[in-house]
Structure formats: C-alpha cells, structure tokens
Image (cartoon, rainbow, N blue to C red):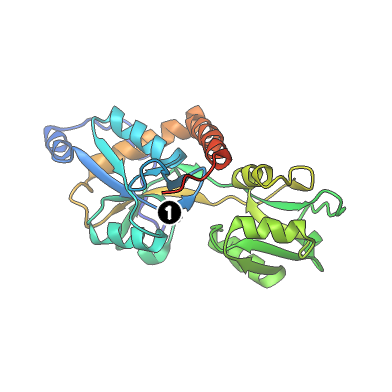
Amino acid sequence: MGAFRVLWPCVLAGWLMSPAMAAAAAKCERLIASGSPDAPPYLWRDPQDPRQLMGANADLLRQAAQELGITVEVLYAGKRSQAQEEVRSGRMDLLVDASLNSAQLEAFDYLQPAISHNEIVLWTRADSGLAAQSLADLQGHSGVRSQRTRLTPEFEALASAQLQLQTVGGLTAALQKLALGEVDYALAGRYAGRVLVESLGLAADLQALALVVDRPGFHLALSSNSACNDPWLRGQLTKKMTESAASGLADEAIKRNLDLWKRQLQQPVSKQ
C-alpha cells in the first residue's frame, strides 16, 4: 500500500489552512465525478435521469463536498472503462468507485480510506449441503461469478489458481445458473446478491454463507489532470472519508441505497 499516493489522517493532524491553501480551495467550486454505471447499491444509473449516477458512493461524496462548500455532479460517462478515460483525461475530475491500481499511479491520486467496501461471499443452494468455511472446502466444486463483480488482485489470482470458476455477463445470470444446479456456488456481493435473490423469487432456494472471501474497497481517485486536484482538496476529502468510515455513515448509505434499489426493481418497466 505504501506504493500508492495516499493520504492518511495522521498527515492532517494539526494542519492549519494557510491563505495560500484557502485560495487554492476557492478556485474549485464544482467537481464532476463518474464511475461504473452498474454497481448497485454503490453506484448505478438513475432511472429517472439517465445522465446522473446514484448510489451510496455518490451520496457520500455529495455530503462530503457539501460540507466543504463544493458542488458535485456524479454523471454517467458510459461503461466503467469509458468513465475512467474521461477522468484520466481531466474532462472529469474524479472517480467515485476506483479500485487501487499501481499501473495507474501517474494518472490518479487514490484517497484513503476507501469510501466503501463490497463484501464478496459464497451463495449456494439451500439444499446443497455445501458449508464452506475456507476456499479449500471448494475443491471439486464448480462456481460462477459475474464479470462485473470486482475482486482484489490478490483474490483474483487465488481464485484463478484454486477455483473452478466460470464467468458470465451479469449477476442475474450467475444466480440463475446456481438455482438451476449448473454450478455449486456463486461468488457475489452480499448486498447486491441479497436484493437480486429476493427480486428473482429465489429467497427460499439460495443462501449466502457467512464466509467473506474478499472485501474490495472503492476509492475516490482524483485525476492528475484535474484543475481541482490540489493538496487542500485531497486532504479535506481524505478527512471526510475517515470521518465517514469511523461514524458508520458509509454503512447507513449502503443500507439506504439497497432499499432504494430494491424498490426500483419492484417497479414495472415503463415503455418509452
């Protein structure tokens, strides 16, 4: 982790904002953020306004920015790779759901701590009898994951070496393969999995095991090409993320957006 350009709260202790820093802060009154459009409850496209992204990460950034007197827009910029390119170029200021990536250190300043985390768990059929307590218990069992489910590089390497894991286009397809008995388990986020299992009518058939196999973090990542990327802003956002993690604010935002996403899934699709 030391290789990353990160700012820890201890760096901020006793930091007094000088007039120069205040002037630097004043020049940035508006931030444009983006990220993945299909990662609920953390970030997804607003069905009421498809130009906007919504979710727990968007809420947490907006609250932090509001306390700093900064206006934030979290906009749809295409799929995740397109959003990354928009921010990398400086056309947008920051990503709100970045994964730490040492290959991108010249392009982004990653802020610590993470704005939120995704608990990856094992989903199994309720009648399967598979009660894995470690990855070793999955030997001889086939699994599935969505290509949209992000894992840490360490777990990705471990899974490739040790697990019989196939990849499908989305989480719904992964859970349906599990329900049909085509695989023995699915790797999925605890929160997203819970909502989709209920919306698919599979709550009596599928269950999440207690074992958390991975816990990737989503980070704020400021573009090196953003005019707003200065020490004052990085420090203040780091401070706000630290306060959010300590206060449980992130957990509250995730729960609130889980409920919102679930209600959206229950609504009939309108025909344009």
Relative to 170, 5 lies left or right: left
Does residue 105 appear anywhere in the picture?
A: no
Does residue 183 appear anywhere in the picture?
A: yes
| Closer to the camera in the image, 162 or 81 | 81
- Report which quarter residue 147 is drawn in: bottom right
Relative to 158, 229 lies left or right: left
Disc 1: CA contacts within 10 A as few (<14), some (14-19) or many (>=20): many
Q: Is residue 207 above or below residue 240?
A: below
Relative to 260, 4 lies left or right: left
Q: How many marks overall?
A: 1
- Horizontal and vertical percent position of residue 176: 70, 57
- Report which quarter residue 62 is drawn in: top left
Residue for point 74% across, 43% down:
203
- Horizontal and vertical percent position of residue 82: 35, 62
| Residue under label 1 | 36
Considering every residue shown, the one lying at the far bottom of the view is: 161
Q: Is residue 242 above or below residue 136?
A: above
| Closer to the camera in the image, 24 or 20 | 24
| Closer to the camera in the image, 67 or 74 | 74
Q: Is residue 50 above or below residue 78?
A: above
Residue for point 71% across, 53% down:
122
- Horizontal and vertical percent position of residue 10: 38, 37
Residue for point 79% across, 43% down:
204
Relative to 11, 188 lies left or right: right
Secondary structure beneath dot 1 equals loop
- Horizontal and vertical percent position of residue 8: 39, 42
Amino acid residing under circle 1: Ser
Residue for point 64% across, 60% down:
173
- Report which quarter residue 174 is drawn in: bottom right
